[in-house]
Image (cartoon, helix red, strand yellow):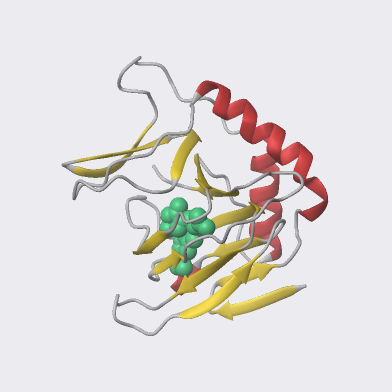
Amino acid sequence: WREQIAPGAVVMHGFVRDHGPELLAAVNGVIAQVPWRHMTTPGGHVMSVAMSWCGNGWSSDSRGYRYSERDSRSGKRWPPIPAILMALADEAAQQAGFAPFVPDSCLMNRYDPGSKLSLHQDKDEHDFGSPIVSVSLGLPAVFQFGGMQRSDRTQRIPLAHGDVVVWGGPSRLCFHGIMPIKEGYHSLVGPHRINITLRKAL
Ligand code: MD5
Ligand code: FE
């Protein structure tokens, strides 16, 4: 079922529940080329979440965060976004009421038990008019969804394997995070949560 949790924010429960194997195959194809890595924040903290990406990639260093079409080490483009993810992003965005959505960046987060993502805003993209489409696979999570100020009160939203959330309109810049993932084992994904986000970054 579909649930609007705020203006522009729609949770599509189970939207991709029947497509786990194909989605994981797409993730693994990217991981073979861009292995999971723990990024260091501009503040010098190593993230508990492991990341990979395709389309425009993401980087973090002492100067801040940014998107880039090439790997600065090899000079090569990051791998393309798999077709199944482009199609899913467009379908979910349309059903949530957004115009055709053509993402140019796909970030993947792998959470192991205990991993978390502290409250933050996604504001390194150049285009805040486009939504972000987020896909949850594997272990469940509790999503924290706040307001435009870090200090605003947050709602806790459970997210399960196969859920898709579209974050657009006024929700695009809200503070959000992921509470520490509980121990567990998912029959398809194993002891992990994987989140895939599709974005228009550049
Ligand atoms: C996750 N990832 O579950 C989340 C899903 C990230 C990140 O937060 O930055 O990689 S995306 C949730 C999201 C995106 C954009 C806006 C809002 C939430 N929001 O306004 O709440 O790993
Ligand atoms: Fe985020």
Q: Quadrant of residue 183?
A: bottom right
Q: Is residue 40 shown above or below 173?
A: above
- Ligand 2 rendered quadrant: bottom left
Residue name at image x 63 percent, y 30 percent? 28
Q: Position of residue 94 (x, y in %)?
A: 68, 59
Query: Quick one: 30 or 170, which is closer to the camera?
Result: 30
Query: Quick one: 146 or 168, which is closer to the camera?
Result: 146
Residue 120 visible, this angle: no
Query: Quick one: 155 or 68, which is closer to the camera?
Result: 155
Count of number-bearing discs: 0
Give the farthest residue toward the front: 183
Residue name at image x 60 percent, y 48 percent? 192
Q: Position of residue 155 (x, y in %)?
A: 49, 81
Q: Position of residue 83 (x, y in %)?
A: 68, 34
Residue 33 visible, this angle: yes
Q: Quadrant of residue 22?
A: top right
Residue name at image x 33 percent, y 57 percent? 123
Give the farthest residue toward the bottom: 153
**Which corner quadrant holds the C terminus?**
top left
Q: Position of residue 5 (x, y in %)?
A: 58, 79
Residue name at image x 48 percent, y 26 percent? 34
